[in-house]
Amino acid sequence: MKTLADLLAEGVAGRRVLVRADLNVPLDGSVITDDGRVRASLPTIKQLSEAGARVVVMAHLGRPKGKPDPKFSLGVVAVRLGDLLGREVLGITEITGQAAQAAVDGLADGDVALLENVRFDPRETSKDEAERTGFAQELAALAGPDGAFVSDGFGVVHRKQASVYDLAKLLPHYAGGLVLAEVEVLRKLTADTARPYVVVLGGSKVSDKLGVIENLLAKVDRLLIGGGMAYTFLKAQGHEVGKSLLQEDQLDTVRGFLAEADKRGVELVLPVDVRTAEQFPDFGAESQPDPVVVPAGGIPAERMGLDIGPDTERLFADKLADAKTVFWNGPMGVFEVAEFAGGTRAVAQALVDSSAFTVVGGGDSAAAVRQLGLPEDGFSHISTGGGASLEFLEGKELPGVTVLED
Ligand code: ADP
Ligand code: MG
């Protein structure tokens, strides 16, 4: 696999380099609430620009439905990228076509431009390879005859999409610094892992994450489960979970996990108490009704579990204390509101206090760490890609990485 270092050694001065970055930041209206991904994309862009490349960054934002939608415009991101880079970033309001080509043709050596959201074009995410290739050809045309492609959007390498996958087949391609660093860290979690190896899972995308559990049961010593997925486990053990998030259709799968953990001697740790409310919190409200802590074994019918409770915070911290390797994905509760952020804070703090190799994966988990004011350098690595890191740990191939190999 060729890397950014190889490209720099070849020489990039005057060449147009297309960089796929992951700039999919959380927004509140048009305000970026966490610019972690923009900052993570800086080193690769900076090195190319300083070496005299004409850098054309491609990225997506949110899930526009294959057509332009001002809500998902990358305009604000171009401004933030420019501020952080310390040089102006030209926000191109098109993706491909004549206007985009003219803008790219106007770049001078070292200039940086950001194309509009690639997902404004339905071909970016099309299941039809010919459609995606057509779009990738238009992107490749922007780079011209001596152009190059640098894949640096780790958060999207698990997607077979035009600007991630198909474009690599059309241009000389290189792995960017971020993709390389992420893959290297994740490899440490899959081979020769220092033990005890403890994984903490939470969050709300329960069915997305069940796949990783199956694979992890063969690798970890301990699995701590909080967040929205805990309730499907509690229910599978026969407990009432009230109005909590529940994946009814996965109960059998989860019962299988419980049996498998038992068989393999993996310690599967579930919450012993939870903080509950009668309604899902209104994020816009000043404050929430006081949470009620109940035993995890008996959530009243009219309440829902929205965070792990204080006894569980201590239990989880205790189960993390002797770990040598920790991977954490998914908040322990609805951390967006202060009343239900305690569990996530406690787990994050336990990782900061730990001397283990600690990796945080997941967009919301990484945002939670920063939002709760924990020191980023308190963790060995904060991954920019939730889905991508989970799929890697599941043992799945990442198409956006594999395509760089040939
Ligand atoms: P990540 O992006 O880190 O992979 P997810 O996207 O899976 O994490 O989940 C993050 C979301 O999970 C947060 O918005 C949080 O509010 C929500 N969440 C956590 N615990 C619960 C719960 N008990 N009930 C409902 N939602 C929850
Ligand atoms: Mg998320």
Image (tube, rainbow, N blue to C red):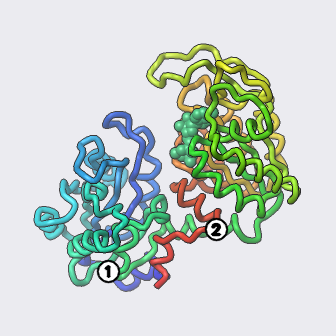
Residue 243 at x, y = what percent?
63, 26
Look at label 1 and name its amino acid.
Leu
Determine which residue is flagged by label 1: 170
Residue 69 at x, y = what percent?
24, 45
Residue 322 at x, y = what percent?
84, 50
Residue 201 at x, y = what percent?
67, 47
Look at label 2 and name its amino acid.
Gly
Circle 2: element type:
loop
Q: How many discs mark residues in the rendered view?
A: 2
Please report whichever mark, 1 or 2, sits nearer to the chain's N-terminal start.
1
Give the residue at x 32% y 80%: 171
Residue 275 sits in quarter: top right
From the viewer's perspective, tell me whether residue 187 is left or right of residue 286: right
Determine which residue is flagged by label 2: 395
Give the residue at x 33% y 34%: 29
Q: Is residue 208 above or below residue 344?
A: below
Between disc 1 and disc 2, the foreground one is 2
